[in-house]
Amino acid sequence: MGIRQWLDAWPVYRQLTGDDPLGRGAAAESARSRALTARTRTADRVVTSVCPYCAVGCSQNVYVRDDEVVQIEGNPDSPVSRGRLCPKGAASLQLTTGPSRRRTVLYRPPHARDWQQLDLDTAMDMVADRVIETRRRTWRWEEDGRRVARTLGIASLGGATLDNEENYLIKKLLTSLGVIQVENQARVCHSATVAGLGTSFGRGGATTFMQDLQHADCIVIEGSNFAEAHPVGFQWVMEAKARGAVVVHVDPHFSRTSAHADLHVPIRAGTDIAFLGGIINHVITHGAYFRDYLLAYTNAATIVCEDYRDTEDLDGLFSGFSPQDRDYDPDSWQYEGAQVAAAAGQREQMSRAEWAAREEGRHRVGSSGRSEQHGSGGAAITGEPSYDETLEHPRCVFQILRRHFARYTPEVVRDVCGIPEETFLEVCRHLTENSGRDRTSAFCYAVGWTQHTTGSQFIRAASILQLLLGNIGRPGGGIQALRGHASIQGSSDIPTLFNLLPGYIPMPHAHQHFGLDDFVRADAARKGYWANMRAYAVSLLKAWWGDAATADNDYGFDYLPRLTGSHATYDTVMAQLDGSCRGYFLMGENPAVGSANSRAQRLGMANLEWLVVRDFSLIESATWWKDGPEIETGELRTEDIGTEVFFFPAASHTEKSGSFTNTNRMLQWHDAAVRPKGDARSDLWFMYHLGRIIREKLAGSTDPMDRPVLDLTWDYPLEDGDEPSAEAVLAEINGRDAAGRPLSRYQELRDDGSTSCGCWIYCGVYADGVNQSRRRRPADQQDWIAAEWAWAWPANRRVLYNRASADPDGRPWSERKALVWWDPEEGRWAGHDVPDFDGTRPPDYRPPEGATGPDALTGTDAFIMQADGRGWLYAPAGLTDGPLPTHYEPQDSPVTSPLYSQQRCPTRLVYPHPLNRYHPAGGDPGALVYPYVITTYRLTEHFTAGGMSRWTPYLSELQPEFFCEVSPELAAERGLRHGDWATLVSARNAIEARVLVTERMVPLRVAGRVVHQIGLPYHWGPNGYSTGDAANELSSIALDSNVHIQEVKALTADIRPGRRPRGPALLELVREYQRRAGITDTTGTEV
Amino acid sequence: MTANDPAPGGPADPAGAAGHPDHPPRVGFFTDTSVCIGCKACEVACKEWNAIPEDGLNFAATSYDNSGGLGADTWRHVAFIEQRRPLGRQHTGVARDGAGPAGEAAAVDLGMPSFERPGDGAGADGRGEFRWLMSSDVCKHCTEAACLDVCPTGALFRTEYGTVVVQEDICNGCGYCVPACPYGVIDKREDDGRVWKCTMCYDRLGAGQQPACAQACPTDSIQFGELDELRERAARRVTDLQLAGVDSARLYGEDPGDGVGGAGAFFLLLDDPEVYGLPPDPVVTTRDLPAMWRHAGTAAAVLLAGLAATFLGRRR
């Protein structure tokens, strides 16, 4: 060191000789400060990933140094997120690298008091043994004389937080083992979306994409806490607002979303159909509908058969209701002159009653989650319906609609929803002024709409409204379904759902048919892309069973186990309680606090022989046997619980490669940045090796029940040690031709066994052998559609049904709202987006007589998956609870329905059980024992049941405790003190929460009386860093009959000051309330 | 006074005045609270980048704010203010009588008897207006930074970007800066003894990156950039909001003529600063130091002169 350097290192010398005589700047800078270098700059590599929380799909840059992740931040190249992250995304460094991550396998032997360590290989081997043994013991070839080839002894839950490739292996392996109770978060979150949007438009996904919201002139957010649950997506609402759009938020509670709305409309939870029905009535009576659009693209003019009777005629019921079976025969809902059956593949999927009906030669729609098969294709139709283009025929859909909704006047909206007439009319004004040729409005919703006993119909109501206003398929329009898990759209598309096969092909029911041809039988007159279902199904069977799937054995169709009713997650809970379900996999889901009636969930698990939990931390579903609420109340004793529990630490999104499908059907690939530590493994690894070990143990078996799993294609290349290649799985999902070359589009699929494809709607994601989901052309190098960022199904279209953005002649409805249009010179559809239409079919095309399938679509059939090519204002088939939405009161309601004597949805599913008691209906004696309406929601700072946030200190400190939000009026009425504790009681359980008294909660005046609402964020449970009671202790299992989703957005309960009792006194409190309310085992189960 | 002492209103070029001759343009934050969605991504992104300790679980029951305020372990802080008053065009369907004056939302029941049934105010006549303000606070990086003025060790320094940074290797925890800050930003970490605050991600600036909070902010409520450009942008935004009917929009801390010579991090607010917990008229606490030194010097000189006169007098 020279003398000068030595002197320069001395701040006083620098101060005296330099430009900083006061020593407050350059002279004071230390050597450390001068040497500071951002760790983003010193990283060895930057890996592109996708945020693992909600389904907006924010791209992340993961910085790695010395094989450690040192920083995670937003990737500015993303057209969706533009480099931004919410607090959860920003905390994903702590989530993935923090000390709460478990790194070792844990094992709890039956009756043991604590965990033991177990090495990974032994644990895998033991789980494989349990699967084989339980399966063999509970295997059934037949049920009631019908071939089922399955086991009800094993179930699996979870998949929405996992990659598509992982879901694919879960479904593939478990199906080959005859396990049918395969479910994931999609059931309890957005299954109603698939039925609601699918029957209306033909596909069960959001009709638009996030960035397109900026083009909306009005955005109605209802049933969603958009700003809190999807903060980064909300930037596009703010963009629209900055461009002058009106934002309306309709919600029981004033949230951070409401804070940025131009108008917040408090609504009584569970009454959205009355509100939307009121707007529909307003639009029709004021002639505010888009008539040209209506005539061209909807079934407004279609004539319905003479036998149809509306709820207006039958006091709240549609024609065809059977009180004994609690379901509808939809024959009388059909179009006139057209034989209506359920959608492609659905007619075979009938419940017991329907089977009998079918035997009598009738076609019916029924239960069993069938409506979800509209996920990528609407209902099928035979015959040619009749139309009245004047819309005057008394039985045309438009007139039926007019009569059905005439009852929903502003006064009824006021009396049902608690919304003042003036406020209601203001919403009507915003919507109608901002819809039409030159303007468009968008609806955004989430689980505030889906999680009801009539959830599918909530979404139907919005679909009808958006069709009337001409807002579907157009820029700035559409219905944005906001999904809440990173790949919950993917776990619906490649379903870990009991009733579906990949691409919304139904799981076959027992004995409805005897072979593949019956399964896919398509009537000659059917049009649309579902006509090719045989090609999709055969290609799937080829993907799963390869050379073992031949024309001679129906391509292994009988390898598929058969359904005999509902095997959805709440049925699985009941099966656990009655002892028929013996083994359970939890793949990143936490039902012990996250599913309705969490006490029933835990007691169900306490009845299992074995339980496998895969997660980051010791979530409540992994430890209930040791420290769950039932141990405290004395209902369970650890020593008495025989359940064997395996805990496997899971790999995080930064530790594995794979694809997430975001809420707008966009598949985005995330690259592994580092390898998981310790025993942590990807779910791809877990399923692959579980399958490998089971197959090795069964090798040589001649038992026919083992054929499907032994014949399975299960030879994925391993990389980086023993991790199966996720890209190889994606390539299988994409599909190959006879020569093994990747397919480019689903139109290439064949039904002769020459092609294979693991999920037909994902065909094209690996086109040209290139992982299209990994495309990352920066947003600033593309137009606003950003078609070269990742890949969206179907066929990379971003706005669905965009043929409707042009008029029947193929010209944009207006220049301002142009999206795709017909280019007569080029003879093709042109525009910004990929046309959701045959690219060369002219607008004036009329199919020749006798055309079938896609060839039968006319040049104006904008809804190409629908059997009649039209958007459905009225659903003549496909839904189990009626062709039109009707307001029924929630299962728990303090109010008597002012509309009909039919109080609740007649087809809703109830599960009477001592653990699952229902409240008396509003008006019944005892209903006011539980006088207050409860609604649940998310906070920005937490995630779902808390497994990915309550263990994360940076998130926990922001919302450290479970709380309830009450109005000052309710606080006064019940003596609740701000910041203190309150106890909430339902017929299921009682919980305690801290009290936030806030004017953001308002009492509503409903039919002359005051209804108080209580808000509950539902993220808590007893484990983790931030702890609290689970809101789901209060909820009951009461389900939408279409899709078996639970009603947790509208409950009732009582609230009282103070903490809840501990120990047995807690149960006594619940029983005392039940006694006071006069609750019996039949209360609330009435039709 | 030396040539480097701040001119009235602060130096136009604080980095240059601090001995960074060829420095980059001064940078800062413009926090537009009118688009803040209160998500707290800024708080988390800041903690992640700067490895700030989590500071415990404390349910504060202060709307959705459980961080309390800026401190040694909270360098970005989001305030939540629930108010009964309209936000420009926004109104709610909330049915309450007699909207009180701003900020007087009675959140706690006092147990006073009432003859009105809740919800009776339903309808247009009784509708109240309601708004929920959110604002992300941060160190202001003052043009005239008192913390910097009083630091005896040189731990605080003015960077070439014009920001004010604590150097953790120099700070000895004397704590003089803590009462010096007119905003109560800088704070001592108890288990460590040193003081900590926002560095505007000094290390990231060197890598050409924006600070972590601004990078994360989902709605661009936190905007980072050259201060001059931000001030122009902010002026346009205020005008736009006022034209849109949000009369309450105003800037805070953008004026180089204010008591701290203009803040390097300034805000668009929708109410008075006090509502957000910000001082209405902050003044650099060292403002009077030169005068005090002058007076002290004068006094000392007089004293000395007196003493000298006394001695001289005795000799006589």
Image (cartoon, coloured by chain):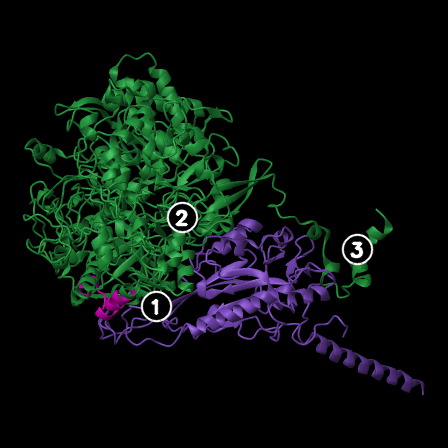
Foreground of the two, A393 or A921: A393
The colour with which the image depicts chain B is purple
Residue situated furthest front in the rendering: A825
Magenta-drawn stretch contains A414: yes
Three-letter code, disc 1: Val
Q: Write down the residue under mark 3.
A: A10
Residue A1003 x, y percent position in the rendering = 25, 65
Residue A421 x, y percent position in the rendering = 21, 69
The colour with which the image depicts chain A is green
Magenta-drawn stretch contains A826: no
Foreground of the two, A546 or A417: A546
Do the residues at pointers 1 and 3 share their chain? no
Q: Are marks 2 and 3 in contact (CB under 8 Å)?
A: no
Tell me the magenta residue range. Answer: A413-430
Q: Write down the residue under mark 1.
A: B108
Foreground of the two, B38 or A219: A219
Q: Is residue A193 left or right of residue B165?
A: left
Q: Write down the residue under mark 2.
A: A56
